[in-house]
Image (cartoon, grey):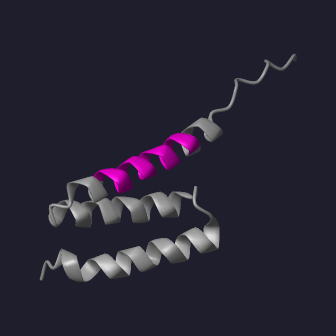
Amino acid sequence: MHEPAAALPFIARALAIDEAAVGPDHPDVAWDLNSLAAVHNDLEQWEEARRAAERAMVIRAMIVTSCSVAPSPRRRR
């Protein structure tokens, strides 16, 4: 049964737990925020959905940026 209103407190709780456990910029938090955005979207709570989705995108952008590594110089043989 699809009841997004019933899921909302559980997703919010998971988000709070993950933020406390791994920090606010962790990929798990971005995952929770995407879930939260989807539920808000289902409930037609557009502004809340947008805020959660944008925060998830910011976290993912930070992750991608931090994973970008400059090419290493070539080794001499």
Q: Residue furthest right?
A: 77
Q: Give the quadrant of residue 20.
A: bottom right
Which quadrant would the C terminus be assigned to in this image? top right
Left or right: 18 with respect to 48? right
> Residue furthest toward the left?
1
Nearer-the-camera pick, 40 or 65: 40
Q: Nearer the viewer, residue 69 or 11?
A: 11
Taking the image as shown, residue 15 lies to the left or right of residue 39, namely: right
Q: Is residue 27 magenta?
A: no
The quarter of the picture where the N terminus appears is bottom left
Residue 66's image quarter?
top right
Q: Position of residue 5 (x, y in %)?
A: 20, 78
In the rendered structure, which segment of residues is drawn in magenta? 50-62
Q: Is residue 54 magenta?
A: yes
Residue at (58, 55) in percent of width and height: 25
Q: Main secondary structure of the magenta part?
A: helix
Residue at x 50%, y 63% (from the top left corner):
28
Q: Position of residue 74 (x, y in %)?
A: 79, 18
- Residue 76 higher or lower than 68, as above or below: above
Q: Quick check: 15 above or below 38?
A: below
Q: How many marks?
A: 0
Residue 67 % position (x, y): 63, 40
